[in-house]
Amino acid sequence: MTDNTEKSSRGRLPTIAAAALLVAGAGVLYVNGGASGKKGSGEACAASRETSQRVSSLAKGEVAAMSIASEPEMMPELTFTGPDGAPRKLEDFKGKTVLLNLWATWCVPCRSEMAALDRLQKEAGSEKFEVVTVNIDTSRLERPKSFLNEIGAKSLAFYADPKAEIFFQLKQTGQALGLPTTFLIDGKGCQIGLMQGPAKWDSEEGRSLVTQTAELSSTPVATPIARP
């Protein structure tokens, strides 16, 4: 081997090592949660397939860009702060259908849809359904609350992630390409739909999609009677 070849090989070693670490890290994300959810999430969400199939035709009109999952999978573990500043987890909402929206004040499309999300929560919020908007501003942390006050949003609880860890966690798995990003999650914690971009959430189509998902999610799946 020539000196030049040896130098070239040595120069590639750090790159190869870094690539190996990146692949290993991606493997950890895959197992613990992400685009493919947690390990075994397909089985955990098997009962959600019927809900997904039945609401797929409702993703139309103002919410036509909502991608309905053909095989729902469990959402990853996500942690943020609640209205009182205490840590909250996405799994705290299990049993209730959730429209999880990630937004920031510097995101113009986000700002334009917050009033509609507030109206959706006012009109459709119940023990079966909640709009959970998580702000990911990382500076001037007083701005999100001030903005919501300015537009008269009174029905949305204030959830935040001032380190934007949720966004980067979901971006790593290809589920959050930008803002706003919105997830429709059933009462089992399974992802029914994903929206990249804004929507008129308080539209007839938006209300129908979330309320039907909530109703189906809260209805036990009938078990076939075994015939002798």
Image: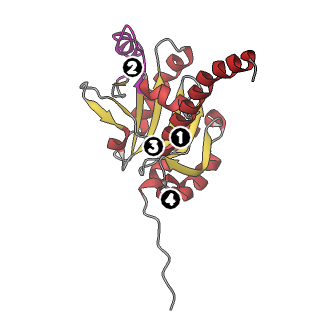
Residue that carries the numbered disc 3 in the rendered image: 32
Q: Secondary structure at mark 3?
A: helix
Question: What is the quadrant of residue 93 in the picture?
Answer: top left
Q: Secondary structure at mark 4?
A: helix
Q: How is the image coloured?
A: secondary structure
Residue that carries the numbered disc 2 in the rendered image: 163
Distance between mark 1 and mark 3 Cα atoms: 9 Å
Q: Secondary structure at mark 2?
A: loop
Q: Position of residue 31 (x, y in %)?
A: 49, 45
Q: In the rendered structure, are the residues bearing label 3 and label 4 in contact, judged by CB atoms less than 8 Å apart? A: no
Disc number lying in front (1 or 4): 1
Amino acid type shown at disc 2: Lys
- Sequence-wise, which precedes: disc 1 or disc 3? 1
Disc number lying in front (2 or 3): 3
Question: Could you tell me if residue 202 is visible in this image?
Answer: no
- Classify residue 92 as left or right of residue 215: left
Residue that carries the numbered disc 1 in the rendered image: 27
Question: Which range of residues does the magenta coloring cover?
Answer: 134-154
- Sequence-wise, which precedes: disc 1 or disc 4? 1
Amino acid type shown at disc 3: Asn
Amino acid type shown at disc 1: Gly
Q: Position of residue 89 (x, y in %)?
A: 34, 37
Q: Position of residue 138 (x, y in %)?
A: 40, 14
Disc number lying in front (3 or 4): 3
Q: In the rendered structure, are the residues bearing label 1 and label 4 in contact, judged by CB atoms less than 8 Å apart? A: no
Residue that carries the numbered disc 4 in the rendered image: 43
Distance between mark 3 and mark 4 Cα atoms: 15 Å
